[in-house]
Image: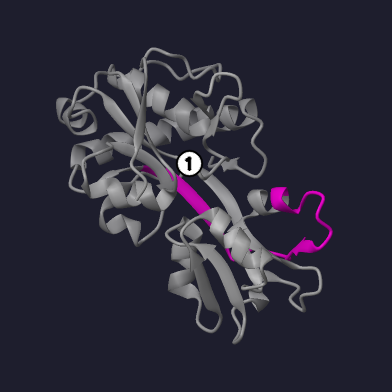
Amino acid sequence: MIRASTLVFAAALSAGCGGMPAAPSAVPAAALAELAPQGKLRAGMNLSNNLFTGKDPASGELRGVSVDLMRELASRLGVPLELVVHATPGDVADASQKNTWDVAILAIEPARAKTITFSPAITEIEASYMVFKDSPLRSANQVDAPGIRIAAPAKAGYELFLTRTIRHATLVRSTSTQGAIELFKDRKADTLSGLKPNLLDLMVGKAEYRLLEGNFMVVNHGLGTPANRPAAAAYLKAFVQDMNASGFVGRSIARHQVQGLSAVK
């Protein structure tokens, strides 16, 4: 697994979304102890999902919806923020039992819920398939058929869903999103699974590809904390409910101009 790197931010930095919710009441001592056991909030960050996290082209600093939410959470807790960077969501999830992060934004998935306790959902993203223009497939509900090969990056939220639900097609897994793309391009798979906004980006200027109609799932992301931290989980649930009700997530999405990511209302 790629070794995680860290970036440290001051908790007082503003998320810059405007119209921030009112300051919360005092943080319960048990929640603070479980969310910041080292005196700081260690946030597991996934660089492979650019809908949530990206790098500022000028400074190289991380930015995006995930950074806004983590800064707001650290500010409410009154502790510094440390961004623990991973290459893939699978790397973040695998590190949940290694005490390297205290909170992370990940797709809510039953397989991950064995080691991670999730908050309510904060966002929705459609997941679908891309095919070559000459493919006989027309809609997402035709893909689960004998002989169809689906390229997918292992341990991505939608790959975990496909692993649970695909009955007839074959999953062709790679270790990364780029690896899944290469499998598809090399015709070692008939379809490429992915988040619809990312698939649309891949299709820009490429007439040989097309997107299938419909989707195979709607991916919900939430804030997760390692299992067996009940006070932390309770605080994150209340935090997310406040973020959703206040419109914080929607404003962050709009500020970063993210297409295809919708806030849960």
Colour scheme shown: one colour
Q: Is residue 100 depicted above or below 156 in this figure?
A: above
User: Which residue is located at x 34 percent, y 39 percent?
Assistant: 4
Q: Write the start and end of the magenta stretch as one range.
A: 201-223
User: In terms of depth relative to the viewer, which is nearer, 253 or 94?
Assistant: 94
Is 150 magenta? The answer is no
Q: Is residue 102 depicted above or below 212 in this figure?
A: above
For residue 253, side relative to residue 102 (left or right):
right
Quadrant of residue 178 within the rendered picture: bottom right
Is 211 magenta? The answer is yes
- Indicate the quadrant containing the C terminus: top left, top right, bottom left or bottom right: top right
Q: Can residue 51 be seen in this view?
A: yes
Residue 35 in the image: x percent, y percent?
Answer: 24, 32
User: Which residue is located at x 42 percent, y 16 percent?
Assistant: 22
User: In terms of depth relative to the viewer, which is nearer, 106 or 9?
Assistant: 9
Q: Residues within 10 Å of mark 1 (few under 14, many from 20)?
A: many
User: Which residue is located at x 53 percent, y 79 percent?
Assistant: 170
For residue 125, side relative to residue 104 (left or right):
right
Residue 63 in the image: x percent, y percent?
Answer: 52, 27
Q: Is residue 59 depicted above or below 265 in this figure?
A: above
Q: Is residue 107 visible?
A: no
